[in-house]
């Protein structure tokens, strides 16, 4: 499946600069991905962009990987790439436009977010962490330092400390929301079967479309428990990608 021509009026291939070591370096992989995309070899372009984000994840590389995957007919992989692009850089409006148009074409729903997950999309995870840490320690410093340094009494340190504490408290729901939002994932590949138990012979509850969102939970061997808006069950791990890639723990491997 390919996007209509007017889709590209809203988005463009983004460039990145990198001088990381290794052969080939991320910037070389990115260049190859750009060249193959422009030549119409979308499968090879997706390979190069995939290798690029594996070495050095960036919002621009994820966005372009999504474009290549979409043009190659891989709807689920494209959705995951654009979601990860927006995860790294919430200000990447092109990635969000990609998601809106692609979901409209593929008739897919966006993930339903909890109240505290909505503000977590306004800034990156690192930005929320920095805001919370800096505001908390600034408030602590402004409360304790005037007494330790015997500064003349003034109202401005107390006002700034109150502001810092307020920012810290306001950032907490967003940080918790970012943590829970990391459990959101998307179906990749066709014919994804949601099963009653984590075995290949288990009864199929329903089939999920590529790009359909869900929330992943417990992992048992080759299966992950996924809850969607329509149902819940066990899905093969190879057919579900989290928005924030999860490291596999030893106890999750049979």
Image (cartoon, rainbow, N blue to C red):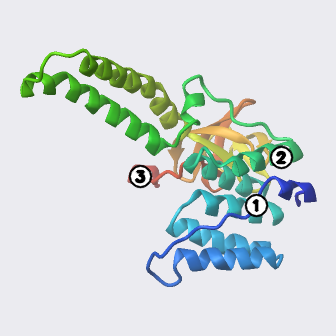
**Residue at position x 58%, y 70% from top?**
52
Q: How many labels does the image show?
A: 3
Label 2 environment density (alpha carbons within 10 Å; few <14, some 14–19, many ≥20) = some
Name the element at disc 2. Answer: helix
Question: Is 57 positioned to the left or the right of 171 in the image?
Answer: right
Q: Can residue 83 be seen in this view?
A: yes
The residue labelled by disc 3 is 249
Residue 201 in the image: above or below residue 129: below
Read off the residue under disc 1. 12
Residue at 10% x, 21% y is 147
Q: Residue at the location (81% across, 41% down)?
A: 108
Q: Where is residue 225 in the image (x, y as percent from the top left)?
A: 59, 40
Tell me whether circle 2 and circle 3 mark residues in contact (CB < 8 Å). Answer: no
User: In the image, is 252 to the left or to the right of 241?
Assistant: left
Q: Is mark 3 on a helix, strand or loop?
A: loop
Mark 2 and mark 3: Cα distance apart in space: 36 Å
Horizontal side of 220 relative to 207 (left or right) equals left
Eye-nearest disc, 1 or 2: 1
Mark 1 vs mark 2: which is more N-terminal? 1
Q: In which quarter of the image is residue 30?
A: bottom right
Which residue is under mark 2? Answer: 101
Q: Earlier in the sequence, mark 3 or mark 1?
A: 1
């Amino acid at each position: 499946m390919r996007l209509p021509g007017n889709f590209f009026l809203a988005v463009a291939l983004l460039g990145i600069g990198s001088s990381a070591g290794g052969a080939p370096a991320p910037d070389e992989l990115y260049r190859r991905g750009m060249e193959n995309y422009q030549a119409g070899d979308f499968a090879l372009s997706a390979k190069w962009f995939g290798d690029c984000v594996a070495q050095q994840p960036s919002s621009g590389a994820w966005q372009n990987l999504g474009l290549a995957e979409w043009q190659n007919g891989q709807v689920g992989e494209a959705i995951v790439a654009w979601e990860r692009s927006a995860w790294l850089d919430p200000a990447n409006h092109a990635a969000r436009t990609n998601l809106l148009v692609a979901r409209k074409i593929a008739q897919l729903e966006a993930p339903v977010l909890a109240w505290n997950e909505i503000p977590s999309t306004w800034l990156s995870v690192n930005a929320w962490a920095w805001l919370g840490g800096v505001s908390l320690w600034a408030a602590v410093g402004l409360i304790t330092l005037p007494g330790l340094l015997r500064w003349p009494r003034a109202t401005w340190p107390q006002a700034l400390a109150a502001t810092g504490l307020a920012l810290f408290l306001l950032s907490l729901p967003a940080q918790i929301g970012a943590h829970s939002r990391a459990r959101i994932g998307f179906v990749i590949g066709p014919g994804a079967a949601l099963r009653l138990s984590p075995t290949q012979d288990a009864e199929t509850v329903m089939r999920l479309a590529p790009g359909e969102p869900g929330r992943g939970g417990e992992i048992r061997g080759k299966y992950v428990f996924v809850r969607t808006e329509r149902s819940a069950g066990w899905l093969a791990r190879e057919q579900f990608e989290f928005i924030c890639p999860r490291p596999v723990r030893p106890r999750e491997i049979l």
